[in-house]
Amino acid sequence: MNENRGQESRRSREQRLRELMQRRDLGALLLRRSANFAWYTGGADNRVDHASPLGVADIILTRDTEHVFTNHIEAQRMKEEQTPGLEVIEHPWYEDEVAAIRDVVGDVPLGADFALDGATADVSEEISSLRYVLDPDALERYRRIGADAAAAVAEAASSLEPGMSEHEAAANLAAACRRRELFSSVLLAAADDRIARYRHPIPHGNALERRAMLVVSAERGGLYANVTRMVYFEEPDEELERRQEACETILRRVREATRPGRTLADVFADCRRLYAEAGFPDEWQLHHQGGMTGYASREIIATPQTLEEIRTGQAFAWNPSITGAKAEETFILTESGPEVITG
Protein backbone atom coordinates (compact mmCIF):
# COMPACT_ATOMS: atom_id res chain seq x y z
CA MET A 1 0.00 0.00 0.00
CA ASN A 2 1.22 3.51 -0.81
CA GLU A 3 2.13 5.00 2.60
CA ASN A 4 1.78 8.62 1.42
CA ARG A 5 -1.64 7.86 -0.05
CA GLY A 6 -2.70 6.29 3.24
CA GLN A 7 -1.53 9.30 5.25
CA GLU A 8 -3.28 11.74 2.91
CA SER A 9 -6.53 9.76 3.13
CA ARG A 10 -6.25 9.64 6.91
CA ARG A 11 -5.73 13.41 7.17
CA SER A 12 -8.71 13.97 4.89
CA ARG A 13 -10.96 11.82 7.10
CA GLU A 14 -9.81 13.64 10.22
CA GLN A 15 -10.40 17.01 8.60
CA ARG A 16 -13.94 16.08 7.59
CA LEU A 17 -14.76 15.01 11.13
CA ARG A 18 -13.35 18.22 12.57
CA GLU A 19 -15.48 20.19 10.11
CA LEU A 20 -18.50 18.24 11.36
CA MET A 21 -17.55 19.10 14.95
CA GLN A 22 -17.33 22.76 14.01
CA ARG A 23 -20.72 22.73 12.24
CA ARG A 24 -22.39 21.07 15.23
CA ASP A 25 -20.44 23.13 17.79
CA LEU A 26 -19.00 20.00 19.41
CA GLY A 27 -15.95 19.98 21.63
CA ALA A 28 -15.41 16.24 21.22
CA LEU A 29 -16.53 13.38 19.01
CA LEU A 30 -16.67 9.65 19.76
CA LEU A 31 -16.78 6.84 17.17
CA ARG A 32 -17.71 3.36 18.38
CA ARG A 33 -19.54 1.81 15.44
CA SER A 34 -17.26 -0.73 13.80
CA ALA A 35 -17.90 0.70 10.32
CA ASN A 36 -16.84 4.18 11.42
CA PHE A 37 -13.85 2.90 13.38
CA ALA A 38 -12.64 0.97 10.32
CA TRP A 39 -13.27 3.96 8.04
CA TYR A 40 -11.39 6.43 10.21
CA THR A 41 -8.42 4.19 10.98
CA GLY A 42 -8.01 2.83 7.46
CA GLY A 43 -9.12 -0.71 8.26
CA ALA A 44 -8.57 -1.36 11.97
CA ASP A 45 -11.06 -3.69 13.67
CA ASN A 46 -12.56 -2.74 17.05
CA ARG A 47 -14.87 -5.79 17.29
CA VAL A 48 -14.97 -8.91 19.38
CA ASP A 49 -18.64 -9.71 18.77
CA HIS A 50 -19.27 -9.39 15.04
CA ALA A 51 -23.03 -9.48 15.61
CA SER A 52 -22.89 -6.10 17.35
CA PRO A 53 -22.60 -2.83 15.40
CA LEU A 54 -20.64 -1.37 18.31
CA GLY A 55 -17.04 -2.25 18.99
CA VAL A 56 -14.95 -2.47 22.15
CA ALA A 57 -12.75 0.51 21.37
CA ASP A 58 -13.54 4.09 20.37
CA ILE A 59 -11.94 6.91 18.47
CA ILE A 60 -12.15 10.09 20.51
CA LEU A 61 -11.44 13.40 18.80
CA THR A 62 -11.23 16.67 20.65
CA ARG A 63 -10.54 20.01 19.05
CA ASP A 64 -6.79 19.27 18.99
CA THR A 65 -6.22 15.61 19.93
CA GLU A 66 -7.13 12.09 18.81
CA HIS A 67 -7.06 8.92 20.89
CA VAL A 68 -8.20 5.34 20.96
CA PHE A 69 -10.26 4.78 24.09
CA THR A 70 -10.91 1.27 25.42
CA ASN A 71 -10.93 -0.87 28.55
CA HIS A 72 -7.81 -2.56 29.82
CA ILE A 73 -8.96 -5.95 28.46
CA GLU A 74 -8.50 -4.70 24.90
CA ALA A 75 -5.86 -1.99 25.27
CA GLN A 76 -2.75 -4.07 24.62
CA ARG A 77 -4.22 -5.69 21.51
CA MET A 78 -5.26 -2.30 20.14
CA LYS A 79 -1.80 -0.85 20.76
CA GLU A 80 0.08 -3.75 19.16
CA GLU A 81 -2.19 -5.07 16.40
CA GLN A 82 -4.95 -2.65 15.40
CA THR A 83 -4.00 0.99 16.02
CA PRO A 84 -0.24 1.10 16.73
CA GLY A 85 0.02 4.63 15.39
CA LEU A 86 -2.51 6.11 17.82
CA GLU A 87 -2.27 6.80 21.53
CA VAL A 88 -4.47 4.37 23.46
CA ILE A 89 -6.18 5.50 26.65
CA GLU A 90 -7.47 2.66 28.80
CA HIS A 91 -9.83 2.40 31.75
CA PRO A 92 -10.89 -0.45 34.05
CA TRP A 93 -13.77 -2.39 32.49
CA TYR A 94 -15.72 -2.40 35.76
CA GLU A 95 -15.76 1.36 36.33
CA ASP A 96 -18.17 3.99 34.99
CA GLU A 97 -17.41 4.25 31.27
CA VAL A 98 -19.16 7.58 30.69
CA ALA A 99 -17.24 9.14 33.58
CA ALA A 100 -14.00 7.81 32.08
CA ILE A 101 -14.88 9.37 28.72
CA ARG A 102 -15.57 12.68 30.43
CA ASP A 103 -12.18 12.46 32.13
CA VAL A 104 -10.66 12.46 28.63
CA VAL A 105 -12.79 15.10 26.87
CA GLY A 106 -13.84 17.33 29.76
CA ASP A 107 -17.18 19.08 30.17
CA VAL A 108 -17.69 19.95 26.50
CA PRO A 109 -20.53 19.25 24.03
CA LEU A 110 -19.97 15.65 22.95
CA GLY A 111 -21.15 14.00 19.76
CA ALA A 112 -21.27 10.21 19.33
CA ASP A 113 -22.16 7.80 16.55
CA PHE A 114 -24.63 5.97 18.81
CA ALA A 115 -26.95 6.87 21.69
CA LEU A 116 -24.52 7.52 24.53
CA ASP A 117 -25.71 8.71 27.93
CA GLY A 118 -24.69 12.31 28.39
CA ALA A 119 -23.84 12.92 24.74
CA THR A 120 -25.06 16.17 23.23
CA ALA A 121 -25.84 14.73 19.80
CA ASP A 122 -26.12 11.43 17.95
CA VAL A 123 -24.27 12.15 14.69
CA SER A 124 -24.36 8.61 13.30
CA GLU A 125 -26.19 9.53 10.09
CA GLU A 126 -23.87 12.44 9.35
CA ILE A 127 -20.78 10.29 9.84
CA SER A 128 -22.25 7.48 7.71
CA SER A 129 -22.61 9.84 4.77
CA LEU A 130 -18.90 10.71 5.03
CA ARG A 131 -18.07 7.06 4.29
CA TYR A 132 -20.00 6.80 1.01
CA VAL A 133 -17.30 8.20 -1.29
CA LEU A 134 -14.24 6.01 -0.80
CA ASP A 135 -10.84 7.67 -0.59
CA PRO A 136 -7.80 6.38 -2.53
CA ASP A 137 -6.57 4.34 0.42
CA ALA A 138 -9.92 2.53 0.74
CA LEU A 139 -10.18 1.96 -3.00
CA GLU A 140 -6.76 0.34 -3.06
CA ARG A 141 -7.70 -1.99 -0.21
CA TYR A 142 -11.13 -2.67 -1.73
CA ARG A 143 -9.70 -3.98 -4.98
CA ARG A 144 -7.71 -6.58 -3.06
CA ILE A 145 -10.71 -7.51 -0.91
CA GLY A 146 -12.89 -7.96 -4.00
CA ALA A 147 -10.29 -10.16 -5.69
CA ASP A 148 -9.93 -12.28 -2.55
CA ALA A 149 -13.71 -12.62 -2.16
CA ALA A 150 -14.01 -13.80 -5.76
CA ALA A 151 -11.17 -16.27 -5.23
CA ALA A 152 -12.80 -17.61 -2.07
CA VAL A 153 -16.09 -18.21 -3.89
CA ALA A 154 -14.27 -19.85 -6.80
CA GLU A 155 -12.37 -22.14 -4.40
CA ALA A 156 -15.58 -23.12 -2.61
CA ALA A 157 -17.45 -23.64 -5.90
CA SER A 158 -14.74 -25.99 -7.16
CA SER A 159 -15.07 -28.09 -3.98
CA LEU A 160 -18.79 -28.80 -4.41
CA GLU A 161 -20.05 -32.16 -5.61
CA PRO A 162 -23.38 -33.97 -5.69
CA GLY A 163 -24.37 -35.49 -2.36
CA MET A 164 -22.64 -32.79 -0.31
CA SER A 165 -24.93 -31.01 2.17
CA GLU A 166 -25.65 -27.30 2.17
CA HIS A 167 -23.90 -27.07 5.53
CA GLU A 168 -20.75 -28.62 4.06
CA ALA A 169 -20.92 -26.22 1.11
CA ALA A 170 -21.29 -23.28 3.50
CA ALA A 171 -18.40 -24.55 5.63
CA ASN A 172 -16.15 -24.72 2.57
CA LEU A 173 -17.06 -21.15 1.62
CA ALA A 174 -16.54 -19.90 5.16
CA ALA A 175 -13.14 -21.61 5.32
CA ALA A 176 -12.09 -20.19 1.95
CA CYS A 177 -12.97 -16.73 3.24
CA ARG A 178 -11.16 -17.12 6.55
CA ARG A 179 -8.02 -18.35 4.77
CA ARG A 180 -7.99 -14.95 3.08
CA GLU A 181 -8.69 -13.05 6.33
CA LEU A 182 -12.27 -12.37 5.22
CA PHE A 183 -15.19 -12.45 7.62
CA SER A 184 -18.45 -13.65 6.04
CA SER A 185 -21.28 -11.70 7.68
CA VAL A 186 -23.77 -13.11 5.16
CA LEU A 187 -23.19 -16.63 3.85
CA LEU A 188 -25.81 -18.59 1.93
CA ALA A 189 -25.59 -22.02 0.34
CA ALA A 190 -28.62 -23.57 -1.33
CA ALA A 191 -29.31 -26.74 -3.28
CA ASP A 192 -31.64 -27.24 -6.21
CA ASP A 193 -35.29 -26.42 -5.36
CA ARG A 194 -34.40 -24.25 -2.34
CA ILE A 195 -32.81 -21.74 -4.72
CA ALA A 196 -36.24 -21.12 -6.24
CA ARG A 197 -38.21 -21.28 -3.00
CA TYR A 198 -36.26 -18.72 -0.98
CA ARG A 199 -34.51 -15.48 -1.86
CA HIS A 200 -32.33 -15.85 1.26
CA PRO A 201 -31.73 -19.61 1.58
CA ILE A 202 -29.86 -19.99 4.86
CA PRO A 203 -28.09 -23.40 4.74
CA HIS A 204 -30.59 -26.00 5.90
CA GLY A 205 -28.90 -29.33 5.29
CA ASN A 206 -30.37 -30.38 1.97
CA ALA A 207 -28.09 -32.43 -0.27
CA LEU A 208 -26.76 -30.94 -3.50
CA GLU A 209 -27.99 -32.79 -6.57
CA ARG A 210 -28.25 -30.82 -9.81
CA ARG A 211 -26.97 -27.36 -8.84
CA ALA A 212 -26.06 -25.03 -6.00
CA MET A 213 -25.97 -21.33 -5.21
CA LEU A 214 -23.25 -19.69 -3.11
CA VAL A 215 -23.69 -16.16 -1.73
CA VAL A 216 -21.28 -14.24 0.45
CA SER A 217 -20.83 -10.79 1.87
CA ALA A 218 -17.13 -10.89 2.65
CA GLU A 219 -15.56 -8.22 4.84
CA ARG A 220 -12.02 -7.21 5.69
CA GLY A 221 -10.89 -3.94 7.19
CA GLY A 222 -14.50 -2.77 7.30
CA LEU A 223 -15.10 -3.06 3.53
CA TYR A 224 -17.62 -5.54 2.10
CA ALA A 225 -17.46 -7.42 -1.20
CA ASN A 226 -20.70 -9.11 -2.23
CA VAL A 227 -20.76 -12.06 -4.63
CA THR A 228 -23.24 -14.69 -5.86
CA ARG A 229 -22.21 -17.72 -7.93
CA MET A 230 -24.24 -20.55 -9.43
CA VAL A 231 -22.69 -24.03 -9.68
CA TYR A 232 -24.12 -26.64 -12.07
CA PHE A 233 -23.57 -30.40 -11.91
CA GLU A 234 -25.71 -30.93 -15.01
CA GLU A 235 -26.91 -28.71 -17.83
CA PRO A 236 -29.77 -26.42 -16.74
CA ASP A 237 -33.06 -26.69 -18.60
CA GLU A 238 -33.99 -24.04 -21.16
CA GLU A 239 -36.24 -22.02 -18.85
CA LEU A 240 -33.70 -21.88 -16.03
CA GLU A 241 -31.00 -20.86 -18.47
CA ARG A 242 -33.25 -18.08 -19.77
CA ARG A 243 -33.83 -16.78 -16.25
CA GLN A 244 -30.14 -16.80 -15.35
CA GLU A 245 -29.17 -15.06 -18.58
CA ALA A 246 -31.84 -12.42 -17.88
CA CYS A 247 -30.39 -11.79 -14.41
CA GLU A 248 -26.90 -11.39 -15.83
CA THR A 249 -28.14 -9.03 -18.54
CA ILE A 250 -30.03 -6.92 -16.02
CA LEU A 251 -26.94 -6.81 -13.79
CA ARG A 252 -24.72 -5.66 -16.66
CA ARG A 253 -27.16 -2.98 -17.81
CA VAL A 254 -27.84 -1.69 -14.29
CA ARG A 255 -24.08 -1.41 -13.80
CA GLU A 256 -23.92 0.68 -16.98
CA ALA A 257 -26.82 2.82 -15.72
CA THR A 258 -24.97 3.61 -12.46
CA ARG A 259 -23.49 6.96 -13.44
CA PRO A 260 -22.46 10.10 -11.54
CA GLY A 261 -25.21 12.68 -11.22
CA ARG A 262 -28.04 10.16 -11.30
CA THR A 263 -29.79 8.94 -8.15
CA LEU A 264 -30.28 5.46 -6.79
CA ALA A 265 -33.99 5.92 -7.53
CA ASP A 266 -33.15 6.61 -11.20
CA VAL A 267 -31.23 3.36 -11.45
CA PHE A 268 -33.96 1.50 -9.62
CA ALA A 269 -36.47 2.72 -12.21
CA ASP A 270 -34.17 1.44 -14.97
CA CYS A 271 -33.93 -1.88 -13.15
CA ARG A 272 -37.71 -2.29 -13.06
CA ARG A 273 -37.91 -1.52 -16.77
CA LEU A 274 -35.20 -4.08 -17.53
CA TYR A 275 -37.14 -6.80 -15.71
CA ALA A 276 -40.15 -6.03 -17.90
CA GLU A 277 -38.06 -6.05 -21.07
CA ALA A 278 -36.68 -9.45 -20.09
CA GLY A 279 -40.22 -10.82 -19.75
CA PHE A 280 -40.36 -10.87 -15.94
CA PRO A 281 -42.16 -7.62 -15.03
CA ASP A 282 -43.06 -8.48 -11.42
CA GLU A 283 -39.98 -10.37 -10.21
CA TRP A 284 -38.28 -7.22 -8.89
CA GLN A 285 -40.95 -7.08 -6.17
CA LEU A 286 -39.77 -10.37 -4.64
CA HIS A 287 -36.35 -9.17 -3.45
CA HIS A 288 -34.46 -5.90 -3.04
CA GLN A 289 -32.16 -5.08 -5.94
CA GLY A 290 -29.12 -4.01 -3.95
CA GLY A 291 -27.58 -0.56 -4.05
CA MET A 292 -24.59 1.20 -2.53
CA THR A 293 -22.06 -0.86 -0.61
CA GLY A 294 -18.73 -0.10 1.06
CA TYR A 295 -18.44 -0.02 4.86
CA ALA A 296 -21.67 -2.02 5.13
CA SER A 297 -22.92 -4.90 3.06
CA ARG A 298 -25.47 -2.38 1.81
CA GLU A 299 -24.86 1.21 2.84
CA ILE A 300 -28.13 2.15 1.08
CA ILE A 301 -30.66 -0.19 -0.54
CA ALA A 302 -32.19 1.39 -3.64
CA THR A 303 -35.93 2.04 -3.70
CA PRO A 304 -38.17 4.38 -5.74
CA GLN A 305 -37.74 6.93 -2.93
CA THR A 306 -33.95 6.76 -2.63
CA LEU A 307 -32.77 10.14 -3.87
CA GLU A 308 -29.13 9.68 -2.86
CA GLU A 309 -26.93 11.07 -5.64
CA ILE A 310 -24.46 8.72 -7.27
CA ARG A 311 -20.87 9.95 -7.17
CA THR A 312 -17.50 8.84 -8.43
CA GLY A 313 -15.67 6.88 -5.75
CA GLN A 314 -18.71 5.05 -4.47
CA ALA A 315 -19.16 1.27 -4.50
CA PHE A 316 -22.23 -0.71 -5.57
CA ALA A 317 -23.58 -4.23 -5.35
CA TRP A 318 -26.69 -4.84 -7.45
CA ASN A 319 -28.32 -8.27 -7.20
CA PRO A 320 -31.15 -8.91 -9.68
CA SER A 321 -32.99 -12.18 -9.08
CA ILE A 322 -35.67 -14.09 -10.95
CA THR A 323 -37.18 -17.12 -9.24
CA GLY A 324 -34.50 -19.81 -9.38
CA ALA A 325 -31.80 -17.46 -10.68
CA LYS A 326 -29.65 -14.61 -9.40
CA ALA A 327 -26.61 -12.51 -10.32
CA GLU A 328 -24.50 -10.31 -8.04
CA GLU A 329 -21.17 -8.52 -8.13
CA THR A 330 -19.41 -5.59 -6.48
CA PHE A 331 -17.96 -2.67 -8.41
CA ILE A 332 -16.50 0.75 -7.74
CA LEU A 333 -17.38 3.78 -9.82
CA THR A 334 -14.18 5.35 -11.15
CA GLU A 335 -13.55 8.39 -13.34
CA SER A 336 -13.50 6.05 -16.35
CA GLY A 337 -16.65 4.16 -15.37
CA PRO A 338 -17.57 1.04 -13.36
CA GLU A 339 -14.76 -1.29 -12.31
CA VAL A 340 -15.90 -4.73 -11.18
CA ILE A 341 -13.69 -5.84 -8.28
CA THR A 342 -15.21 -9.32 -7.80
CA GLY A 343 -14.87 -10.47 -11.42
Image (cartoon, helix red, strand yellow):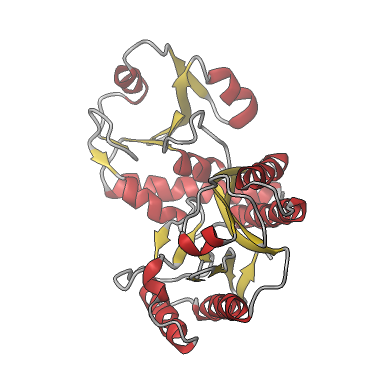
Question: Which residue is depicted at the point 48% across and 28% down?
Answer: 68
Residue 100, above or below 289: above
Residue 202, above or below 330: above
Residue 114, above or below 272: above
Q: Residue 219 at x, y = what percent?
A: 58, 47
- 240 or 332, which is in the foreground? 240
Q: Residue 246 at x, y = what percent?
A: 56, 80
Residue 75, above or below 198: above
- Do we see residue 221 in this rendering? no
User: What is the number of callouts on the image?
Assistant: 0
- 330 or 272, which is in the foreground? 272
Question: Which residue is depicted at the point 63% across and 70% down?
Answer: 339
Question: Which residue is depicted at the point 65% across and 56% down?
Answer: 146
Does 201 sit left or right of 165 as displayed?
Answer: left
- 252 or 114, which is in the foreground? 252
Q: Residue 262 at x, y = what percent?
A: 41, 78
- 304 or 283, which is in the foreground? 283
Q: Residue 333 at x, y = what percent?
A: 56, 69
Question: Which residue is depicted at the point 40% across and 60% down?
Answer: 300
Does 267 sit left or right of 339 as displayed?
Answer: left
